[in-house]
């Protein structure tokens, strides 16, 4: 494949980066686990088992953590329904994200832990993204064998768009994003502007994960990618 002459490929995570939505998905899981399985998670367990992870990995994590727990299709359908309801009614974009995404000096794409079906209904709330990307620029977890923290989805995005990993910058909000970027040989920026993410402890974890910067606003993100042209 011909390698793109564009200087950088910006690979965006969706939840917690483009949309302030991670809190919505976590609330659905916590509420459904409590109602259906009488299971409550500590803050530490929530972060470890649910944050920044695709639903299929959340299911695996929980069943390993609770040896007798079985999350069947009925349970997962309730998760899907809850996420869709909250997404359609409460999901909002991160402030100034469109300004950063509109920078035409870069090629932009999305690599998300959502499935194609989940991403499709999320995009009905974010039609403005179509000004900067086509549906061929969306990479979903069901397009690869392993989700994050495996590098598969980021490598797929780079290969499809014609970029070498060294010319890609991942903008993510979870440690799994940064682990996947490292494994793919890509730089990453930690965005901590979503609700609840900007704490000293989490910033330090992001730094330890090898990100090139930790940013609380999209204006800070824009500054960092400008430095890496």
Image (tube, rainbow, N blue to C red):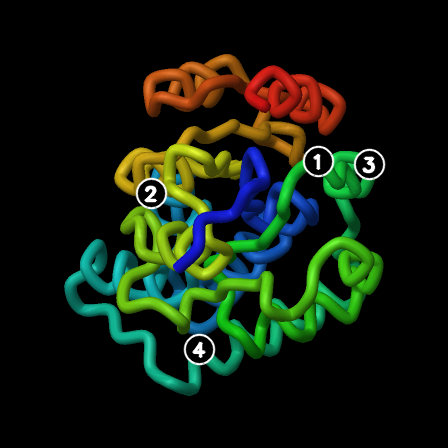
Q: Which residue is mark 1?
A: 105
User: Circle 3 sits in a helix, a strand or a loop, which is it?
Assistant: helix
| On screen, residue 103 above or below 207 | below
Residue 172 spot, x, y in % from top left: 52, 38
The vertical placement of 162 against 211, above or below, is below
Closer to the observer: label 4 or label 2?
A: 2
The quarter of the rendered structure image containing the N terminus is: bottom left
Q: Which is more foreground, mark 4 or mark 1?
A: 1
Upstream in sequence: badge 2 or badge 3: 3
Q: Report the residue at 46% width, 59% height from top.
A: 113
Of mark 1 and mark 2, the one earlier in the sequence is: 1
Left/right of residue 74 with respect to residue 88 in the rendered view: left
Mark earlier in primary sequence (3, 1): 3
> Which of the two labelled residues, at mark 4 and mark 2, occupies the earlier sequence position?
4
Residue highlighted by disc 4: 76
**Residue at image mark 2:** 180
62 left or right of 195 in image: left
Among the 4 quarters of the image, the one containing residue 181: top left
Q: Position of residue 105 (x, y in %)?
A: 70, 35
* Residue 40 picture location, percent across and down: 41, 53
Disc 4 crowd rating (10 Å Cα; few below 14, some 14-19, many 20+) is some
Return the disc, 4 or 3, that comes first in the chain's sequence: 4
Q: Which circle, 3 or 1, is nearer the viewer?
A: 1
* Distance Cα–Cα, label 3 vs label 1: 13 Å
Q: In the rendered image, which residue does mark 3 sit on? A: 99
Q: Nearer the viewer, residue 205 or 37?
A: 205
Q: Residue at x 22, y 59 (%)?
A: 66
Q: In the image, residue 110 lies at what x, y percent?
A: 57, 54
């Amino acid at each position: 494949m011909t390698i793109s002459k564009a200087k950088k490929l910006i690979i965006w995570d969706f939840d917690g980066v483009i949309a302030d939505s991670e809190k919505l998905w976590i609330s659905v899981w916590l509420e459904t686990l409590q109602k259906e399985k009488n299971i409550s998670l500590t803050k530490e367990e929530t972060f470890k088992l649910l944050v920044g992870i695709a639903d299929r990995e959340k299911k695996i994590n929980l069943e390993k953590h609770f040896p007798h727990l079985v999350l069947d299709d009925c349970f997962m359908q309730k998760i899907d329904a809850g996420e869709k309801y909250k997404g359609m009614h409460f999901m909002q974009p991160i402030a100034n994200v469109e300004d950063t995404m509109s920078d035409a000096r870069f090629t932009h794409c999305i690599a998300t832990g959502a499935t194609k079906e989940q991403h499709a209904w999320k995009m009905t709330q974010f039609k403005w993204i179509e000004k900067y990307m086509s549906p061929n620029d969306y990479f979903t977890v069901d397009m690869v064998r392993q989700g994050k923290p495996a590098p598969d989805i980021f490598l797929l995005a780079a290969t499809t768009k014609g970029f070498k990993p060294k010319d890609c910058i991942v903008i993510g909000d979870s440690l799994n994003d940064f682990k996947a970027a490292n494994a793919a040989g890509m730089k990453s920026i930690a965005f901590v502007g979503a609700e609840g993410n900007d704490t000293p402890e989490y910033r330090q974890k992001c730094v330890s994960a090898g990100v090139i910067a930790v940013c609380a606003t999209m204006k800070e993100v824009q500054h960092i990618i400008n430095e890496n042209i």
